[in-house]
Image: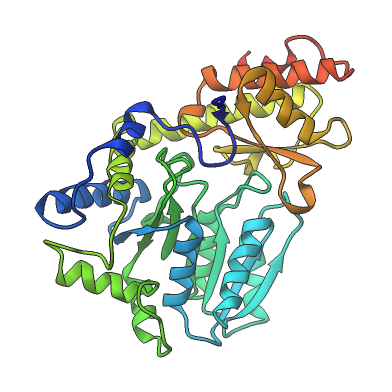
């Protein structure tokens, strides 16, 4: 089977040294050795979240983490504000509704970011709101919602701030404590550069107070109170309910070491620089980037076809001719856009130059008048 370089929005390429840990001999998911592995991984994650709060390493996808947070943080009938400007912003509201919450939908067209004034206006019409649910890096559009500003607006109205950082953490600037974020969920397989299978949940004391005030039934393994109890009562032996996929955690420990060794600020700048090269090259070839420059994600880019090319044909061309796998759009944008992940090892000229050259090759072969070499306009 041919191997493709994964430049989809996730999972992404993984450093070979990280990937080798998936075939390490298994170790027990309890005891002194395991506690050392898990505690180091959590400490690394706290540094990446930029939080002094609790971090939980959970079996499952990012959606698992989101479901657990909403299950634990609210009672049925609680009122929340869902910021819907993309597929995954809508997903947050859907998860909330599935738990019996009342959702006020704040909706914008795909590609448009939310602003603090949007929250102010929503609260004026719904004074019983308890929280704001927002996606940081929206992989359906390539927009990075300005979480810092949105969190400040939410805090002004005493609202909890719940952030989906699944596609942003590790490559996009994020300061959980400094920005006033109460809960953030992410996953192992995107900018954290690790294999899929783990959801990571960071939670502060303000969110714990809200959880402790809840009256409704919470279940067991999906209840963050259960995880807190195990982390407290069995901290030195078995600090989680059930069996954890140990090799995934060992791999995540390795990838988070690499991230911290590089330095977060340096890493954020590397991702931002590569993203600018991608967007500049695409625009120079006459293609439309869905997100405006001031709100574009550092980890991924969404390109609208606008009738200039067939997204499915471009995906297949890049796989066949360049060994690169990008993704088509989501839902109504499936045949109208492509999505390119340039995070982790893909945030490098060695990864994106072949991609850009491949797109130019495809466009020229398809009969478009594209100036030769224009794809590399961002390098000048």
Say if residue 377 shows up in the picture. no
In this view, 74 is above or below 116:
below
Residue in the image at 77% along x and 35% along y: 312
Q: Nearer the viewer, residue 90 or 210?
A: 90
In this view, 207 is above or below 310:
below
Colouring? rainbow
Query: Can you give x and y, in whole percent of width and height, for residue 217 in the image?
Result: 41, 87
Residue in the image at 75% along x and 27% along y: 283
Left or right: residue 1 compared with residue 368: left
Query: Can you give x and y, in whole percent of width and height, for residue 227 in the image?
Result: 29, 70
The residue at the far bottom in this view is 215
In this view, 15 is above or below 138:
above
Residue in the image at 19% along x and 47% along y: 27
Query: Can you give x and y, in whole percent of width and height, for residue 348 in the image?
Result: 50, 23
Left or right: residue 262 compared with residue 180: left
Residue in the image at 50% along x and 74% along y: 159
Residue 329, quarter of picture: top right
Left or right: residue 252 compared with residue 370: left
Query: Can you give x and y, in whole percent of width and height, for residue 285 in the image?
Result: 78, 21
Q: Nearer the viewer, residue 212 or 178?
A: 212
Quick one: quadrant of the N terminus?
top right
In this view, 268 is above or below 141:
above
Count the marks: how many?
A: 0
Residue 380, quarter of picture: top right
The residue at the far top in this view is 372
Say if residue 141 shows up in the picture. yes
């Amino acid at each position: 089977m041919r191997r493709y370089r994964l430049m989809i929005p996730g999972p992404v390429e993984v450093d070979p040294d990280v990937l080798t840990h998936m075939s390490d001999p298994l170790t027990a998911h309890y005891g002194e050795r395991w506690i050392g592995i898990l505690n180091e991984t959590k400490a690394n994650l706290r540094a990446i979240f930029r939080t002094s709060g609790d971090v939980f390493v959970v079996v499952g996808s990012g959606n698992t983490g989101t479901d657990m947070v909403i299950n634990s943080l609210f009672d049925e009938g609680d009122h929340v504000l869902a910021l819907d400007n993309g597929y995954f912003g809508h997903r947050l509201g859907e998860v909330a509704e599935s738990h019996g919450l009342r959702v006020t939908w704040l909706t914008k067209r795909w590609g448009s970011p939310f602003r603090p004034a949007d929250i102010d206006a929503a609260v004026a019409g719904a004074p019983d709101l308890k929280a704001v649910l927002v996606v940081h890096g929206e992989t359906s559009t390539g927009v990075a919602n300005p979480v810092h500003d949105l969190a400040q607006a939410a805090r002004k109205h005493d609202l909890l701030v719940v952030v989906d950082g699944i596609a942003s953490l590790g490559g996009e600037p994020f300061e959980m404590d400094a920005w006033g974020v109460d809960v953030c969920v992410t996953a192992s397989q995107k900018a954290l550069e690790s294999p899929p299978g783990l959801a990571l949940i960071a939670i502060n004391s303000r969110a714990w107070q809200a959880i402790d005030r809840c009256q409704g039934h919470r279940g067991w393994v999906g209840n963050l109170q259960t995880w807190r109890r195990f982390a407290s009562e069995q901290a030195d032996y078995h600090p989680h309910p059930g069996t954890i996929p140990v090799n995934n955690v060992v791999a995540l420990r390795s990838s988070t070491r690499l991230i911290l060794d590089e330095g977060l600020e340096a890493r954020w700048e590397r991702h931002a620089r590569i993203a600018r090269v991608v967007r500049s090259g695409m625009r120079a070839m006459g293609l439309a980037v869905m997100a405006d420059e001031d709100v574009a994600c550092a980890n991924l880019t969404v390109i609208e076809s606008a009738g200039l090319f067939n997204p499915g044909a471009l995906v297949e061309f890049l796989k066949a001719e360049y060994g690169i796998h990008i993704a088509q759009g989501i839902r109504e944008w499936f045949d109208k856009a492509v999505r390119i992940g340039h995070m982790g090892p893909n945030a490098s000229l060695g990864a994106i130059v072949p991609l850009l050259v491949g797109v130019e090759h495809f466009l020229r072969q398809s009969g478009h008048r594209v100036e030769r070499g224009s794809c590399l306009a961002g390098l000048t």
